[in-house]
Amino acid sequence: MAQTDEPLEPFTVHLLRSLSAATRMLRASPLDCTRVKRSSCIARLTSLHRIERRAPKTLADVGSPADLIDLDRYPIGTVRAGSVAAPLRASLAERGVALLPGFLEPEAVAVFAAETQHLVPRAHREDCSGTPYLGLPEESYPDGHPRRTTVQSVTWVIAYDLIPTDSLVRALYEWDPLKDFLAEVIGRGPLCRFADPLGAVNLTSMVAGDVQGWHYDSTDFVVSIGIQSSRSGGDFECAKAIRSAADENYDAVARVLRGDGAELVEVLPLTPGTLMVFEGRNSLHRVSPVVGDVPRAVALFAYDTRPDTNSSDLLKLVRYGRTEAIAPAPWGAL
């Protein structure tokens, strides 16, 4: 999900637990997985992620990013876009989430899945533990308190600079009409694409046993597109607006963390082709453990109301295994 360089002191402490492992990966060249076991690493990932080793379609094969979208339902770039954005903006205000089912055409979903499968051998394994507040447990709180409760998050992450220049995922993200439409949905003024060359777009893949633990976001909103659902599990679960600036509501949060607050949680199964806008700063949420031999895959598009929003180097090191970007290349150069 998108990360900003706003003050992140608790999150920085949280990430220190993974810093030494990430540093070792950086020294071993993250793009090679390891210097001496590249072939075995790719073989293992190919097995885990059911990879089909054929090059996906490119933008030249499609024509325009608009052809990826069901424009009858979502007339982006036309005068009718505003009338579609209005109820989505109302849903975001009321529920903290706006869902656009069938946003991508089925053929586009298949291409996005092929791109993810093709790129996943270059993914970084993000494996972090901490509290839902993106920090380390605070011993001053009693056992069972949310501030002292630890959750685990494990995901394979493909950084933006590894997504080819003629990728359809990249083309859709860099298409101005989509950015402008999302600005209408979110209702916070004009949007800018993230300035982070690693984090502006992420493709994520979660295999059996992977999970995103209960947490709050450090950003105001996240845009995601479902690419592939797992056979079971991998659901997006959310306790909407469970806290506020005036009240952390620790008792209710503790119930959710213990698993006995089901009435507080809305479950949103991943549906391929659905675009979701989610406000997670005050809504506790997680992705339930993935079950089965089909990975859960999602595209994350990062925007902000500021033009220069980036991520900290420490966050990049843990999420991507490195801090410096490489020059993106077309599919033919991979």
Image: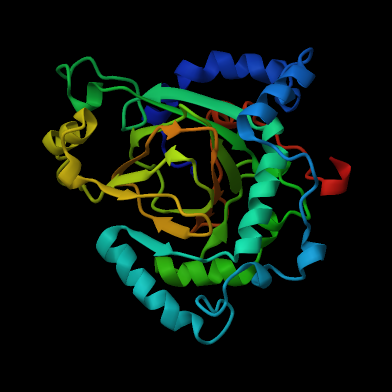
Question: Which residue is drawn at the image coordinates 77% and 62% (left, top)?
Answer: 59
Could one spot residue 157 in this view of the protein? Answer: yes
Measuring from the top left, give residue 52's x and y in whole percent.
Answer: 73, 40
Question: Which residue is drawn at the image coordinates 76% and 14% (left, top)?
Answer: 37
Q: For this view, does 247 lie left or right of residue 326?
A: left
Q: Is residue 172 above or below residue 257?
A: below
Q: Is residue 112 above or below residue 94?
A: above
Residue 153 lies in quadrant: top left
Q: Is residue 207 above or below residue 144?
A: below
Measuring from the top left, give residue 41's x and y in whole percent.
Answer: 71, 20
Q: For this view, does 133 lie left or right of residue 61?
A: left
Measuring from the top left, give residue 250's x and y in whole percent.
Answer: 15, 34
Residue at the far left in the pictured view: 251
Measuring from the top left, give residue 16's x and y in whole percent.
Answer: 47, 19
Question: Which residue is drawn at the image coordinates 77% and 70% (left, top)?
Answer: 63
- Is residue 237 or residue 148 the one in the foreground? 237
Could one spot residue 188 in this view of the protein? Answer: no
- Is residue 16 or residue 254 the one in the foreground? 254
